[in-house]
Image (cartoon, rainbow, N blue to C red):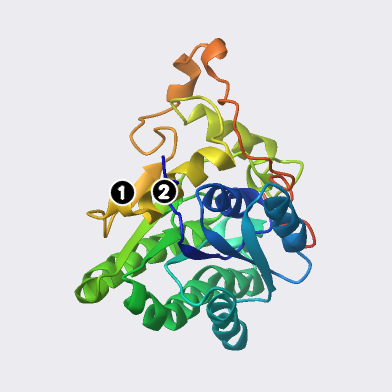
Amino acid sequence: MDRRLKEKVAIITGAGAGIGEAIAHKFAKEGASVVVNGLPDDPIEDVVNSIRHYGGKAIAYAGDVSQEFHAQNCVQTAINAYGKLDILINNAGVFLATAELQDYPAEVFDDTIRMNLRSAFLMTKYALPHLHKTRGNIVSAGSEAGYNGLAYNTVYGGTKGWMHSFMLGVAVEQAKYGIRANCVCPGAIDTAWTHKEDSPMNAKMEKNLIDATPLARRGTPEEIANVYAFIASDEASYVTGALWLADGGVTTAKGSAGSDTPFWMRFAPKGELRLDHSKEGLENKQTQTLI
């Protein structure tokens, strides 16, 4: 059976760790040639070397794509290396602080808006002329927080609400060029962002995330990467303007539904992807816990 992304070219931003790393591995496993983007101190070269070790095609682009120069160069890197662009994954983003809004640092707000929103705007802007040629598609990182809000990081949830509307607008506007645009909207995923030891979350927030999830566990980066792979593939040719919830049921739940799930059912499936950096998404980044 042909792999679902055979002969496709994809850029994945924020691909050095966590969900982005899993997307890069999954796309390569499905036959895509990938550009692995991250900040200069992210382990993107490790991800590229791992993909190549297992027979995939990957190159790295180190640069902050919330800066116009790097967004343009990241897209051009894909064109120079592979001759075309079929898929853009806007995954880059940050989760830097938890605080009640009256205590939320203004400088963290500015950084979050820049990294979560400006990066997606610039990458989409510069990718679109190339995606027109291939009738390609864009999948961006939404979140259940964009539906439900997120107490103690209202700014993060707000950026995801913007991302949802941004992709819906792109889907309608760009359909005449054959472009599809969608969001994947995860819940709590087993990355650095959802562990109190590695993120701005405290123990209460961490517990509440799981209790509010009917499946009573975190999702895995690979489970989310699987959703991205389907939506980015030609199998999803009639899917555009979709906000694809992959949140363990948290958006649908009323209250602490996870407490009713038996403990023996609270285990994630064993994945296939060989991920080395799933818990490193906040390394070299300054975070704040103000609650």
Q: Is residue 180 above or below residue 205?
A: below
Q: Position of residue 282 (x, y in %)?
A: 72, 55
Q: Quadrant of residue 283?
A: bottom right
Q: Is residue 119 visible?
A: yes
Q: Quadrant of residue 239?
A: bottom left
Please state which amino acid type lies under the numbered disc 1: Glu
Q: Position of residue 157 (x, y in %)?
A: 47, 56
Nearer-the-camera pick, 186 or 11: 11
Q: Position of residue 54 (x, y in %)?
A: 68, 46
Q: Secondary structure at mark 1?
A: helix
Q: Secondary structure at mark 2?
A: loop
Residues at marks 2 and 1, CA–CA distance in whole angstroms:
8 Å
Left or right relative to 23: residue 129: left
Left or right relative to 251: residue 88: right
Circle 1 packing at 10 Å, graded few (<14), some (14-19), many (20+), is few
Left or right relative to 155: residue 171: left
Q: Is residue 2 above or below residue 232?
A: above
Residue extending farthest to the left is 176
Residue extending farthest to the front is 1
Residue that label 2 marks: 4
**Mark 2 and 1 residues: CB-CB less than 8 Å, in contact?**
yes
Q: Position of residue 14 (x, y in %)?
A: 61, 62
Q: Residue at x 62, y 36 (%)?
A: 206
Question: Which numbered disc, 2 or 1, marks the residue that appears first in the sequence?
Answer: 2
Please state which amino acid type lies under the numbered disc 2: Arg
Q: Is residue 207 above or below residue 37?
A: above
Residue that label 1 marks: 235
